[in-house]
Image (cartoon, grey):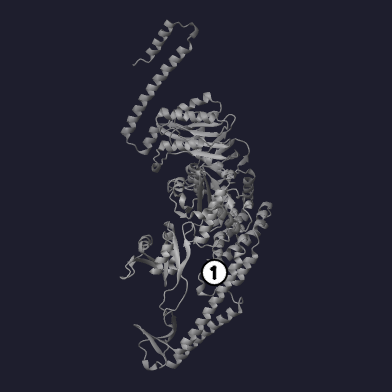
Amino acid sequence: MKQYNEIKKKFPQTIVLFKVGDFYEIFGKDAIQCSKILNIVLTKRNKKYSIELAGFPHHSINNYLPKLIKSGLKIAICDELETKSKKDKVILNRGVTEIITPGVITNSEVLESKQNNFLCSIFYKSQKNGISFLDISTGEFLIGEGNKNYINQMINNFSPKEIIYAKNQKKEIKYILNNKKIPLQSLDNCLFDFNSCYKQLSQHLRTNSLKGFNVHKLFLGISSAGAILAYVCNICNYKIRHINSIKRIDLGKYLNIENFSFENLEIKSSKNEDAITLLKILDFTYTSMGGRLINKWLRFPLKNIKKIKSRQKILEEFLKRNQVGQSIRNKLKKIYDLERLTGKIVNLKSTPYDLLILKKTLKSLIEIKGILLKSKSKKLSKLGYKIIDCNKIYQTLENILFADAPKNINKGNVIKPGISKELDKFRNVVTSREQTILKICERERRNTGINNLKINFNNIFGYYIEIKRIINKKNIPNQWIKKQTLANVERYITEELKNQELKIKLAKENIKKIENKILEDLTNFLVEKIDQNKHNAKIIAKIDVILSLTQVAKTYNYICPKLNKSFNISIKEGRHPVIDFQIKSNEILYVSNDISLKRENKQIFIITGPNMGGKSAILRQTAIIILMAQIGSYIPAKYAEIGIREQLFIRVGASDNISNGESTFMYEMNETASILNNISERSLIILDEIGRGTSTYDGISIAWAIIEFLHNHPKKPLVLFATHYHELNHMMKYYKRIRNFSLEVKEKNKTLIYTRKLLPFGCKKSYGINVAKLAGIPNMIIKRAHKILRFFEKRNKSLNIKYNRIKQFVWKLKLNKLTLETSRAILKKIKHFFKKQ
């Protein structure tokens, strides 16, 4: 316990898994906490120490560790650093061999196969911040710099599992994170020293400077990146040789989608647990690398038309050569996570089983390369040439490893015969001694006349003779030594068996040493090939994603959009991919619609229409189609020409931020303000029901002013604006680049029929009462609502008549000829118009 307490002092905020014999034990408050998480028994050490205790067998760590990590805990593995005989009554030396945290882990049981597991580091200074992300399991290392909004966007983009920061910046970091529930870890301020960090990064990346990575001017970013290396290497004790580059996060290369816009589109997740996201529609990937890559493509759509068209052309080639694509898909099914396998090998955590699945993966890689080179397509052949030849690595693994090597090297039979003469010799010893034991068994049966005599083995007695108790004991030789009497059998050992057992034991120990040495040499060989494997993993991931998009295009009848440098958007018969998928599942025809936005004369669409008419679907489908086009995917439409977008802003749906004291309307205005303050000439702005969170006239006024602002803005962004404020339809009369549209609805026998067809004129009704009726509002309320509606409609009609009369009367006046007395008479007449009836 003294030894445990000394170790616990060094790691106060960490759960220490303390190795004692065959168990990992947990003490005190840690034991209470872990027993609840792991659902294991909580007991006490003994009366002398009177401390809480929980634990589990050391070989079950892979079952329990994931639960602790997923609970956000930091774990220290404290192992026995020496081995001694059980007879020696001494305390074994123990030490922490590994720190495992939510952001620093390579255990495949914890990691989500198609999601990155990023550790994040933030370094704050004034109003600017440095940020870096490291996924130790895949070797991805990213760095950036920016203000609070930039940091928040990066955190939302990469979803880190843990964030580290300098101790003296706790308040600033919590302010930046804005109550995000991510495990935080503070580090000594000295770990963020710029000079030390620059030197550490350069040394690790084996360069004289960081200019080659174009990150040398990111001073705060370098401080955050250096600290992340120190945390992983020096504190968590991980080897990171597979991390051989650092990449700058350059948002200028990608379509900018604000966090709230991304959430509103339900690309990767939804507030509704049962909702189908765009990712679920597009992700037909077979490999973990492909699954992670399609996530990145969706979060970072391209702006470079050349790169987008490159993806489109490969996709087109696979569509033309369906058999080639199908052959590659069959091979992709056999490919394991090459990136994470590489990480395990570098950290010396790979098992013989890991090396076997690496061998199978490399075999499939070789076959995929061959298929691409024989495809008779220049583009696919070029893709095949990018896969680095890995025959040497595969052949080395094939020559050394048994095809059915066990996961645990302690079970032996990992290395093939012929690799080591010494290994073969000791294996022959084991085989011959085991044969000798069989001969001893046969001999003793003959000598004793006991036909059911057996020789078995267990860890307690080693080899022993077992006979039934009913046997006449006169037949049992004197040299047999009784070791155990059970209900039906008796067990004996002999000096001869012990000698054979000792020789077998020594031979097996030598076999284990030799196999370990061969595996160590093999691992060192594979470590030298990490760059090659990482490169091939990237190519396979890209092939997997493009084949996934190919399958989507073929299954759902998507087309290739034309991308250009214009500022316009033209989509014919566009469909929402998620709704289209759901409707086709029920064999219903989707009602497609056209969208044609032009800066010169169709800059802003004001879309009105009934509740449930499909306004939100059209807004979202337009944004999603553009996002899909800019990742290189085919899209759900008949035809599309899209001027490349730089920004995509979507403000739809009602939400609030209660934790920060923000109402629904305040939240709506915050998001709208963010849009209006960050407009570029290649922005697409989609706004739904802006102003509805306040009074009618306030809402109309705000909506009118926003549309006016967007119309008159020098950047002339393209805008889709859905609303129930029919008064906004009048704006088309005053602003030349505004167009009115509405969703068609037909009335038949007092029943509404939603055609969901977009029409080129405004709508004057919302049909909200009909929707209330469909929702099951009591009939008496529906009838009363209709009466109140008729009253307001009649009153408004009366006011409109009066207004028009006054307008016509005033319009006919000849102002130059009016006298004071005549003016008074006219005002008296107007006043009479508004007299209460």
Visible residue check, residue 814: no
Residue 346: percent from the left, percent from the top? 56, 64
Q: Is residue 209 above or below residue 595?
A: below
- Sort mark 1 into few (<14), some (14-19) or many (20+) by Cα contacts within 10 Å: many
Residue 291: percent from the left, percent from the top? 53, 54
In this view, the residue in front, 522 or 217, is: 217
User: Quarter of the image containing the C terminus?
Assistant: top left
Left/right of residue 647 with respect to residue 389 in the rendered view = left
Residue receiving disc 1: 352
Q: Is residue 768 above or below residue 188?
A: above
Determine which quarter of the picture holds residue 515.
bottom right
Residue at image location 39% in from the left, 42% down from the top: 658
Amino acid type at circle 1 is Pro
Q: Is residue 445 above or below residue 542?
A: below
Label 1 element class: helix
In this view, the residue in front, 61 or 371, is: 61
Q: Is residue 493 above or below residue 4?
A: below
Q: How many marks?
A: 1
Residue 344: percent from the left, percent from the top? 54, 63
Left/right of residue 44 with respect to residue 456 in the rendered view = left
Visible residue check, residue 269: yes
